[in-house]
Amino acid sequence: MSSPSWIVNYNIISGALWSFVLVNTLLVAALYSGYEVFDLTSTWNTLIQCCAVVEIYNSAVGNVRSPLVTTVIQVASRLLLVIGIFTILPDSPANAHWSYITMITAWAISEIIRYYYYAVNILSEGNPPATLKWLRYNAFLILYPVGISSECTMIYNSLDEAALAVGEWYKWFLIACLAVYAPGSYSTVPDLTPLKYEQKLYASLRVHNRPYLVTKGDEMILPFRLKNAEVGDVLNFHDVTTIGSRNYTYNVSGSIDPSIFTIKAVVVEKTKKPMYVKEITKRRNRHTRHVKVKHDYTVLRVSELKLNI
């Protein structure tokens, strides 16, 4: 799977928009309080969050690797707040509560990290800075609980206003959403945990139409000498059919996307290896003899096999 070139620009622009959301919300919160903060920031926050529907499209058509169901849950939970609370219930006491500021702050920081990580990951061909990668897979440990608890607080504080402004049915709708909110949100956590990326990966690849199943540290003995490759050279492999770990597998058609997977091997030896082969005697076809021959071969050691996302 290869990402369209516009995905990079989309991620950069999205990161910039969420940077604006963060700065705007914090500055307004420092100067004003209560409903004034909501009135001065909610329009921009709602518009920028609604742009996230593009995430569903990207996941559905395969522009990104994010699971469709997980993406729908994440986007729907945010839209419930910006449409179901901000827009439909603008006079809700939740909008003047401290949870509004903590929720927007958690959203903005997590999205800034996520979008810029995706952009840099593609531009660097799967080698983002270690600090940015660490933030991508560790910052959520703080931001996720803050965001979820703030969202639940916002919904809970809006129940009475929902009954008055819309009707009892809307209040019970929000209660139902609140009941499934935590379990539904928990289902998105495994896609962020770094443990998934620490599992030992394997890859099924082909070298000169010969299949090999390897993992990091394995050696591949090729029964020929690789041309234009010397001992110590590092080779990149793209002709991969399958890559995965104990818990998940990706079937790759054709070639591998270097922005998602990296498979490298170093040439450790090129020489002739004495070996015995069976040879059918001319006298009787049913008799064989072992003949010692020298065969050109190349030894490659898999030095890097990783998932870059």
Image: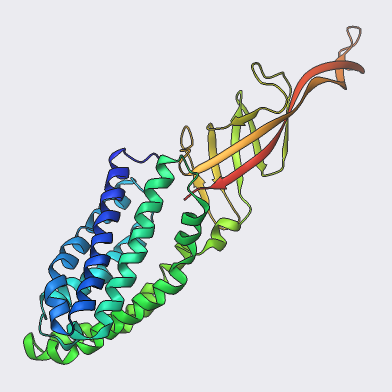
Residue shown at the point (44%, 74%) measured from the top left: 142
Residue 297 picture location, percent across and down: 76, 22
User: Between residues 166 and 129, which one lies in front from this camera angle?
Assistant: 129
Residue shown at the point (46%, 63%) measured from the top left: 192
Residue 308 picture location, percent across and down: 50, 48
User: Between residues 130 and 229, which one lies in front from this camera angle?
Assistant: 130
Residue 45 picture location, percent across and down: 19, 67
User: Between residues 136 and 244, which one lies in front from this camera angle?
Assistant: 136
- The reply to whether residue 102 is visible in this rendering is yes
User: Between residues 160 and 207, which one lies in front from this camera angle?
Assistant: 160
Q: Is residue 271 left or right of residue 128?
A: right
Occupied quadrant, residue 33: bottom left
Query: Does residue 285 sit above or below 245 in this rendering?
Result: above
Residue shown at the point (24%, 77%) measured from the top left: 30
Q: Is residue 225 left or right of residue 114?
A: right
Q: Is residue 20 left or right of residue 303?
A: left
If the image is split into quadrants, where does the N terminus sit?
A: top left
- The reply to whether residue 69 is visible in this rendering is no
Query: Does residue 177 sit above or below 289 in this rendering?
Result: below
Q: Residue furthest left?
A: 165
Residue 235 picture location, percent across and down: 61, 29
Query: Does residue 50 sit above or below 300 in this rendering?
Result: below
Residue shown at the point (28%, 85%) measured from the top left: 153
Occupied quadrant, residue 246: bottom right
